[in-house]
Image: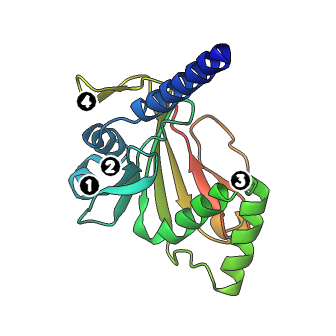
Amino acid sequence: MNRLKNISSLLTFAFLLIGTSAYAQIPDENTQIKSATLAAPEEMRTGVTVLGFNSKGQLVTLKEGTNDLICLADDPNRKGFNAACYHKDLEPFMARGRTLKAEGKSPKEIFDMREAEVKSGKLKMPSQPTTLHILYGPNGSYDEATGQMIETKYRYVIYIPYATPESSGLPTKPRAPGEPWLMDPGTHRAHIMVTPKN
C-alpha cells in the first residue's frame, strides 16, 4: 500500500513538473510583444496590435494597436521561432484557420472549408492585395538581453484571392532564389511568395 502511495506521489510530482515547465516556456508579455513586433516593417512597429499567449497558453491580445497591422507572437509549443504580422483585413481568414486547427482539422480540411466559406460569402477575404510578413529561425532566435534577432530570415506573402498566372504575370514556381512566384493560383488563398536570399 505504501509503495502505491509513493508511486502515486511521484507521478503527481512529475505531472506538476511537466505543467510548470510548460508554463515556464511561455515568455513574458513584454518579450512576446518585442519579438513579434520585429516581424513588422520598422516604420509601423510602434502602432501594431500584438496577439500572444497568456500563462495558460491561450491566445490573447497583449497589445492594442493604432495602425492596420496585427502581429502574432511566436508559439512556444512549436519548434523554432516564427513571428508574423499581417494586415487587419486578413484577420477573419487567419482567425478561422486558427479555430479549425484547434478543432483538429487537417491542412487540407482547413483549405477546403475556407475555400467553400469564401465562395459562399460566409468568410470575407480582402478585396485588395494584402501582405503577411514572416520572421522565422531556429529556437533561441530572439535575444532577450539585446532585443535583437539571431539567425532569422524574412518571408513575404501577398494575398491576391483567385489570382492566376494569367492575371498576375507570375510563374507558379520560383525561377531563382528570392524571385516572386504565385502559390495556390485560382483559389481564395492565392498569394505571391517572396523569400529574399540570405
Task: Depth check: give the residue in front, 101 or 151.
Answer: 101
The numbered disc on residue 147 is 4
Q: Camera-side residue: 25 or 74? A: 25
Q: Is residue 89 above or below residue 39?
A: below
Q: Position of residue 54 (x, y in %)?
A: 38, 47
Image point (63%, 56%), residue name: 102
- The residue identified by callout 1 is 44
Q: Which of the 4 image quarters holds residue 39?
A: top left
Residue 34 appears in the rendering: yes
Is residue 2 depicted above or below 93 in this figure? above
Element under label 1?
Answer: helix
Question: Quadrant of the rendered structure where residue 175 is?
Answer: top right
Q: Secondary structure at mark 2?
A: loop
Name the image colouring. rainbow
Disc number lying in front (3 or 2): 2
* Mark 3 or mark 4: whose residue is earlier in sequence: 4
